[in-house]
């Protein structure tokens, strides 16, 4: 298993809108290496896409530290980047950048934060990253 480390920083868009964006998961690095996360799990790109699409269809809720609290945050944006999607996106905006070497897969998310305390923690830097919460069968 490769031990790849990533720094997942939140990108705060607007304090007035209480929107926060960032990477939620990296499945495969740009050069095509499957990532092993801190729990020693790996997610194949197809499974990453399926998991995030299921999340969008069934939940879209966000909470703090996997506590499953209501009215904390809600998903407003999600994009699972793959080589095919990256090429299509760049082409759609008029870029002819060569992305043929890109082999990565990752999930980008954005949340609207409703809870005052949670937003305060985002602004202060106490909450600095996203963490996915899921169940799976280990193989």
Image (cartoon, rainbow, N blue to C red):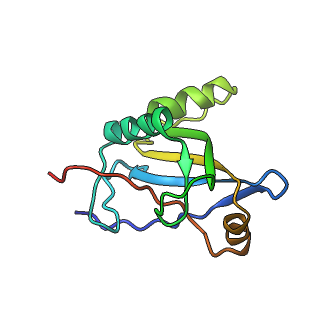
Above-or-below relation of 82 to 94: below
Above-or-below relation of 49 to 128: above
At x 67%, y 74%, the residue is 125
At x 48%, y 63%, the residue is 67
Q: Position of residue 54 (x, y in %)?
A: 41, 35
At x 81%, y 59%, the residue is 15
Above-or-below relation of 65 to 87: below
Nearest the camera: 101 or 24?
24
Q: Name the quadrant of the N terminus.
A: bottom left
Q: Position of residue 3 (x, y in %)?
A: 31, 68
Q: Position of residue 81 (x, y in %)?
A: 49, 39
Q: Position of residue 26 (x, y in %)?
A: 43, 53
At x 56%, y 64%, the residue is 129
User: Count of labels shown?
Assistant: 0
Residue furthest left in the image: 139
Nearest the camera: 135 or 44?
135
Decide if residue 111 is in sight here.
Answer: yes
| Location of residue 95 by image quarter | top right
Q: Seen in the image, is 104 located left or right of residue 17? A: left
Residue furthest right in the image: 16
Decide if residue 81 is in sight here.
Answer: no
Q: Seen in the image, is 25 located left or right of residue 69? A: left
Nearest the camera: 120 or 19?
120
């Amino acid at each position: 298993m490769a031990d790849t480390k990533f720094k997942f920083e939140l990108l705060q868009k607007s304090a007035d809108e209480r929107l926060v964006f960032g990477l939620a998961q990296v499945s495969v690095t740009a050069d095509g290496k499957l990532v092993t996360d801190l729990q020693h799990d790996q997610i194949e790109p197809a499974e990453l896409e399926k998991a995030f699409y299921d999340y969008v269809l069934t939940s879209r809720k966000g909470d703090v530290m996997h506590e499953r609290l209501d009215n904390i945050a809600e998903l407003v944006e999600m994009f699972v980047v793959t080589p095919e999607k990256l090429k299509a996106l760049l082409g759609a905006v008029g870029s002819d950048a060569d992305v043929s070497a890109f082999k990565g897969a990752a999930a980008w998310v954005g949340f609207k934060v409703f809870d005052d305390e949670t937003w305060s923690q985002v602004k202060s830097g106490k909450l600095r990253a996203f963490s996915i919460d899921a169940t799976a069968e280990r193989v």
